[in-house]
Amino acid sequence: MATGRTHRPATRSRGIPEATVARLPLYLRALTALSERSVPTVSSEELAAAAGVNSAKLRKDFSYLGSYGTRGVGYDVEYLVYQISRELGLTQDWPVVIVGIGNLGAALANYGGFASRGFRVAALIDADPAMAGKPVAGIPVQHSDDLEKIIEDNGVSIGVIATPAGAAQPVCDRLVAAGVTSILNFAPTVLTVPDGVDVRKVDLSIELQILAFHEQRKAGEEAAANEGTGAAPAVRGESGDKGPDGDVPAVMPA
């Protein structure tokens, strides 16, 4: 089986926009669910609704893949699963290392969705000597002193950083120097990488803050509407849900 070190997805060379690439996993997830239910075909409207996009955008995205569906029939589910998986590089084996095996790193190691989506956790790495040799998700943790050798031995091109913020950049530098060209960063910091290295950042606190913004905006709109009608402002938590200090605040992150 090919490894991620020698084969990379063809999306860039084919000119597929980054926004389209970002939506392909959404389509794949929806299509996989349909496949598991033995649904043979799906219309663009049905698939778009399942993926959370509009149908015109979906059809435009699929045109970059050379897939246009059949009028009156729709898209062949199994073929689209294969086609999108191929474009994303998921028809081959991608060995991944996770660096930083605290609570988050351990949770990632235990995530069962990697293998079914073309990713194999090749190694778990941590700087704490006390962690060395301890199994997490059935994989013994290895010390960060051996990071470069681990990457070379396993042909790793994708690294996951789940360290504290202060350790993330040094870990990133070592990963890049060892040949890793794609990094998924869970540390709450911005990483600096050279050209040719892709970084995707996952920051749960930022996502919650964005949700809090939307909650605050909805609460403001609701208050303005009530003011216009003379109705009493609605209070979230009126059903009896109370916080430790009494009523639930009107604005809460979702």
Image: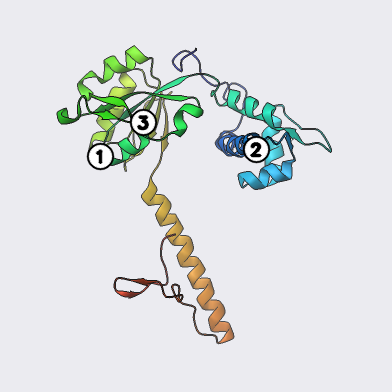
Q: Amino acid at mark 3?
A: Val
Earlier-in-chain disc, 2 versus 3:
2
Residue 37, labelled with which disc? 2
Callout 1 secondary element: loop
> Residue 91's x, y, as percent?
55, 21
The crowd level at tag 1 (other Cα within 10 Å; few <14, some 14-19, many 20+) is some
- Choose the circle earlier in sequence order: 2 or 1: 2
Is 6 situated above or below 193? above
Residue at the bottom extreme of this rendering: 230
Kindly check if marks 1 and 3 are in contact, taking CB atoms under 8 A apart as contact: no
Query: Spatial distance from mark 2 to mark 1, Cα to Cα?
Result: 41 Å
Q: Is residue 6 above or below residue 94?
A: above
Residue 175 in the image, given as x and y percentages of width and height: 31, 23
Q: Would you say the residues marked 2 and 3 are in contact, meaning their CB atoms lie under 8 Å apart? A: no
Residue under numbered circle 3? 160
In the rendered structure, which amino acid carries the disc numbered 1? Pro
Closest to the observer, 232 or 248:
248
Name the image quarter holding the C terminus: bottom left
Count residues near mark 2 (Cα–Cα under 10 Å), then give few for <14, some for 14-19, many for 20+: few
**Camera-nearest label, 2 or 3:** 2
Residue 157 visible? The answer is: yes
Residue 8 rendering spot, x and y as whole percentages: 51, 19
Amino acid type, label 2? Arg
Do the residues under discs 2 and 1 have CB atoms within 8 angstroms? no
| Residue 66 sits in quarter | top right
Q: Which residue is mark 1?
A: 164
Considering only vertical position in the picture, is 203 above or below 40?
below
* Alpha-carbon span between mark 1 and mark 3: 13 Å
